[in-house]
Structure formats: structure tokens, C-alpha cells
Image: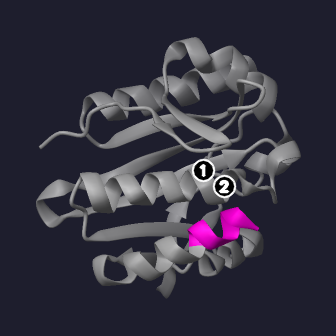
Amino acid sequence: MNLQAIALTGKSIRLEPMAMAHVSALTRCGLHSELWHLQPVPITTENDMRRYVQTALDNQQRGGSLPFVMVDVATNTVIGSTRYIDIALQHFRLEIGATWLTPTHQRSCANTEAKLLLLTHAFESLGIKRVVFKTETLNAQSRKALARIGAVEEGTFRQHLYTTTGRARDMVYFSIVEKEWPGVKAALTSRLLK
């Protein structure tokens, strides 16, 4: 089974398949240094964003990812990006990652609803049994957010990834497995109703 590009729509967020046509919109919402200071490759120009999108689409062509842009339904404005990565369908596993939101939409319902859409599609449509998340140990905000949605911290992979400057990144792994999904779904849905 191959993952097909599909739009996933919630009440306030729509996840659209990423395309080169999104480069300008992603540039408008994504050139904030705080979004990239812990990432392996900083995005500081429209050309950087174009390479970022092209790399994501190239990886999609090889079957390694399925990238989305996040769209605010009320304004029909692109506000960030996320994707399925490290897809291993033969092992019923994938990762949700490369997620970022423009600062105006951080700490809103946008990330929660995007995670609910992606997790629902993974577990209920694709038959995935394990969803993985990883974040850098230095990213306390991301670690708290993953714990808050019900992901279980599994451990730290030391010097797991390196940035383009050569800085080692210790990565913390989290996961949600199939038997945990009903409880996680209920909690995420409840948070969106508040």
C-alpha cells in the first residue's frame, strides 16, 4: 500500500497536500528565526523555503514522506506545515514530524487539531499500529506538547542527528500505539471542545 496525497479537514484546520505552489505562502508565514533555531537546516529566505518544499516532495516521490501544509479554515491562509515521515507500512508504523506553525497560531487549537486529523487518518484509515514523534531534548515546548496529547516518552537517542553547522542533536522519542489511540482520541477531541 502506498500513501496517497489527501486533504484532511477539521473544524478550524485543513491539511492540504504540499505542492511547489505553496512556497510563497509558506515563506510568508515561515520566515521566523525562532521556528528554525533548533532545526538541522535554518530557513531564512524564499529560496531556502523552495528547497525545503522540493526536498519534501522528492522524499514523497520515493515513498518516504507525505507532506502537508496547514491552512486556517476561517481565513484560508497557510499557517504552517507537517508531514508523515519515516513511513514503514510493512511494519504498520510512521512518524509525524517536521511540524511548525507560524508564531501567531502557536498555543492555539491548530496543532492539536492537526495532530487529531493526522492520527485519525493513520490509525483509522491506514491501519497504522504505531505513530512515532521525535523532538530535540532542548525543545521543552515540543516535549510538553507531545506529553499533553498523550504520547508516551520512550527514551533519548544521543547524538542522533546533526545540523548543517555540525551541532549534535539528542532526540527524544515518543509514540502512540494502537491500543492507546481511543484514549488519546477522546482526550484530543475533548481539548478541542474547550
Callout 1 amino acid: Thr
Residue 38: image quadrant is bottom right
In this rendering, the label closer to the viewer, 2 or 1: 2
The Cα–Cα distance between marks 2 and 1, rounded to whole angstroms, is: 9 Å
Q: Quadrant of the C terminus?
A: bottom right
Residue 66 appears at what percent x and percent y? 38, 39
Callout 2 amino acid: Asn
Residue visible at 38% across and 83% down? 180
Q: Which residue is mark 1?
A: 99
Judged from the image, the secondary structure of the residue bearing numbered disc 2 is: helix
Residue visible at 46% across and 82% down? 183
Does residue 92 appear anywhere in the picture?
yes
Residue 7 appears at what percent x and percent y? 44, 32
Residue visible at 60% across and 18% down? 22
Residue furthest to the top:
21
Whether residue 191 appears in magenta in the rendering, the answer is yes
Q: Which mark is residue 111?
A: 2
Q: Mark 2: few, some, or many residues within 10 Å (few <14, many ≥20)?
A: many
Seen in the image, is 127 located left or right of residue 119? left
Seen in the image, is 118 located left or right of residue 94? right
22 w.r.t. 137: above or below: above
Q: Which residues are magenta?
A: 188-194
